[in-house]
Amino acid sequence: MTSYPQDAVAAGPSRTEPVRWRLASISLSMLLASLGTSIANVGLPSLAEAFSASFQEVQWVVLAYLLAITTLIISIGRLGDIVGRRRLLLGGIALFTLASALCGAAPFLPWLVAARVLQGLGAAAMMALAMALVGEAIPKQKTGSAMGLLGTMSAIGTALGPSLGGALIAGFGWQAIFLVMVPAGLLALFLAHRALPADHPASRPTRSGFDLAGTLLLAATLGTYALAMTIGRGAFGMTNLMLLLMAIVGMCLFLFVESRAASPLVRLSMLREPLLRSGLATSMLVATVMMTTLVVGPFYLSRGLGLSAALVGLVMSAGPVVSALAGVPAGRFVDRFGARRMAVAALGIMATGCLALSIAPQPLGVVGYVMPLIILTAGYALFQAAITTGVMKDARPEQRGTVSGLLNLSRNLGLITGASVMGAIFSFVAASEAATAGSDAAAAGMRATFAVATVLVVFAAAIAAANRAHEANPTPQEVSVAGK
């Protein structure tokens, strides 16, 4: 990707608004958006009982939130480029807070699902614009550390959700898992309003319109793909196939519309820039791999190692804890050694962890699972800091919101794909080993799934290494463009 001058705002923080308060407001926004994803999962049994609904019905409380984020995050990022990122972030936090209150007051299930859609819309703004604002609110030399902190907050939100949600439901009922985010949202709104710098007119494109047709078409396409990957809970049938074909057709139509739009939602020329293109591809592959730990891990630990539900939860918490602890140090490594070099190194670490999980023998027990998981997660934290820093640093000021939305979208699509594809691989291999003991079948499924995950990480590393080599030896045309 061609490097462009940063905004004047990014050159240094103002003395009246310390950088730490800007980081606090951005980080709290990321924490709440991640918490909204994980805290509702633990409440599904209580919701099913409270509304006399089936699991298939109450799972839309989780799915509605994820679909809203996935389908709208690029559009919100682009809208932030046009109307101002600070302004839209404040609106997103306010909507998230209001929707949280509406969730807690829901008298029936359709109300709750609709409120979760609104909450997801607010979360999409918080995720996309928090990353984009780092380039404006944080000094350039601290970008890696800031991105590492955002990764830490995301991991803490994901890890905190189940335990916090369980405690709140036990003490106050299911409404509390949503109402707890109201005061936190108000605090985030106050901090963002006081600390974040005003939108800089020069950083926004002049007389740029919003691509409504592209927005609606992309939202429909992404929603269709997400449904294709989630409906059926691992069983890929005719309905899933039809939805997937519709998503492919929708993407072709979207690219056609964007190529002719006066103010496209996504400028197709952006996707031809090597750093962004490789960043999106590797981000989706890595997210697919990380979802494997969440989908396959619990089955292996319970069926393969015979752990109780409580111990499974304790072992599974090792990943988010490592990610939370490694986020800030990873960002400092990126600031010191460079994003491209650290991205390749991180993928090498992840490949080592995946390979160890694919060959770790059952006799090692929990240690044989936890140690490779720690290696894998530490590599993931470093990769997140590196790829986000590298892509966002080189993004044009007027495109940061769109680029941030694309990065978040690639991760979400990877998570959705990983849940479906990796879960299907595990189920297929485990079922083929059903004649053996249950523990052996689960172990066989895990070995096969993480063998595939290792291949995916190696492929991502090859893409990153090729991009680094390309950056070191640009074509004459790219040198000419960079010099302009």
Image (tube, rainbow, N blue to C red):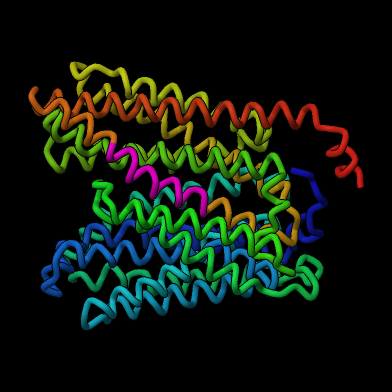
Q: Residue at x 40, y 39 (%)?
A: 290
Q: Quadrant of residue 313?
A: top left
**Magenta run includes residue 414:** yes
Q: Is residue 53 shown left or right of residue 378?
A: left
Find residue 134 and report its horizontal and vertical position in percent. 64, 56
Q: Quadrant of residue 176?
A: bottom left
**Magenta run includes residue 219:** no
Instruction: Please tell me whether residue 237 is drawn above or below residue 216 in the rendered image.
Output: above
Residue in front for this viewpoint, 264 or 156? 264
Find residue 357 and report its horizontal and vertical position in percent. 32, 24
Q: Residues in magenta?
A: 409-424
Q: Quadrant of residue 303?
A: top left
Q: Is residue 4 shown left or right of residue 128?
A: right
Residue in front for this viewpoint, 27 or 442? 442
Q: Residue at x 30, y 60 (%)?
A: 39
Instruction: Please tell me whether residue 322 is drawn above or below residue 11 in the rendered image.
Output: above
Q: Residue at x 38, y 21 (%)?
A: 355
Find residue 446 and report its horizontal and vertical position in percent. 26, 28
Find residue 148 and report its horizontal and vertical position in percent. 55, 44
Q: Give the prevailing secondary structure in the magenta stretch.
A: helix
> Can I make out residue 329 in this image?
no
Q: Residue at x 73, y 30 (%)?
A: 470
Residue in front for this viewpoint, 225 or 445? 225
Instruction: Please tell me whether residue 106 is drawn above or below residue 293 in the rendered image.
Output: below
> Can I make out residue 434 in this image?
yes
Q: Quadrant of the N terminus?
A: top right
Q: How many marks?
A: 0
